[in-house]
Amino acid sequence: MILNVGIENLVCLLFPFLSFINSFFFLCLFFLYTIGILISFCFCVENFRHVLGIDVDPESLEIAGENVTDLELDVDFLRCDIRTLNLKGLLVDTIVMNPPFGTRKKGADMDFLSLALKVASRAVYSLHKTSTRELRFDVPQMYKFHKKKEVDIAVDLWRFVP
Amino acid sequence: MRLLTHNMLSCNIKGVTNGFPLKLEADKWVTKEVDLNADFLRGVFPKIEWPALVAAARALDYGDLPEQADGSMLTSEDFLRRFHHALLELHVEEGALVCPETGRRFPISKGIPNMLLHEDEV
């Protein structure tokens, strides 16, 4: 179950933020750049009613699809490069994403972030690489350029308000 | 893909100005029942482009939505039920989304629309 990776940590970390945002969240959109480990978190919060998962990679979408089926969650998926994503208006309340870390292509994480802030009306939660070990993020070997079988990467979770 | 998602998407080809709504061509769709949440429906109603939802529902042989709708109808349980069904219970599995301006087809396969662009469209 890939969805279980790191989720407990993540949920604990997020709940303090969420306790005061109890108003109407209708939509959560996140970019499954790796694999949608963040889906479960969205459903921990009762007010999330519609979740759209976006990725360019069909394999990630397929795995995420299997996971949500196993967990009996309702999630819609879309295959798209978010740099060309065109949603009708400011429909999305909240974005949860784990963008590319920007270590291979400098600034790649910032591209994602500026896009996310254009689409979200309420908040953007985003995971970024850091040297402070707030949260351990278990990254299995997923791409050809990954040399180690599995590594722990220290990441920070940021909350941005547009 | 549910019709709520369809209602949000517009054509993302560079230079297209009238990319909404994408025409829905459905070959296969399924119905999955979910609990009706009236608060959610009332909250989401102002964000919905009603004619686009009616057209998409018709493409799935669901013709029980009124041509026009306004906020006062949200007090009707019958209206809410139909709105709920069209918005959240119909899932398009196979088909395509067609750009109203260019006619470009975005295929839907296994429930997932593919809106990746070709190089000359970015």
Image (cartoon, coloured by chain):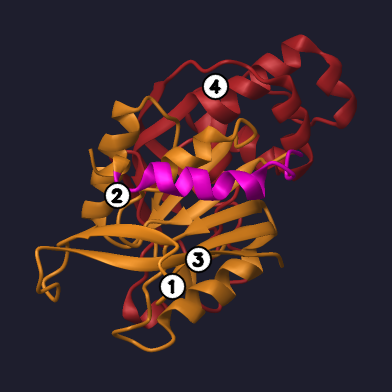
Task: Indicate which label's residue lies in the foreground, 2 or 4.
Answer: 2
Which of disc 2 and disc 1 is earlier in sequence?
2
Q: Mark 1 points at which residue?
A: A132
Q: Name the residue under label 4.
A: B62
- Under mark 1, the amino acid is Thr
Q: Mark 2 points at which residue?
A: A61
Disc 3 is attached to a residue of which chain? A
Q: Do the residues labelled 1 and 2 touch (CB within 8 Å)?
A: no
Indicate the colour of chain A. Answer: orange
Indicate the colour of chain B. Answer: red
Disc 3, SS? loop
Disc 1, SS? loop
Quadrant of the image for the N terminus of chain B?
A: top left
Q: Position of residue A50 (x, y in %)?
A: 56, 38
- Under mark 2, the amino acid is Leu
Where is A142 relative to A75, above or below?
A: below
Q: Name the residue under label 3.
A: A85
Disc 4, SS? loop
Q: Are marks 3 and 2 in contact (CB under 8 Å)?
A: no
Disc 1 is attached to a residue of which chain? A
Mark 2 packing: few (<14 Cα in 10 Å), some, or many (20+)? many
Give the farthest residue toward the right: B72
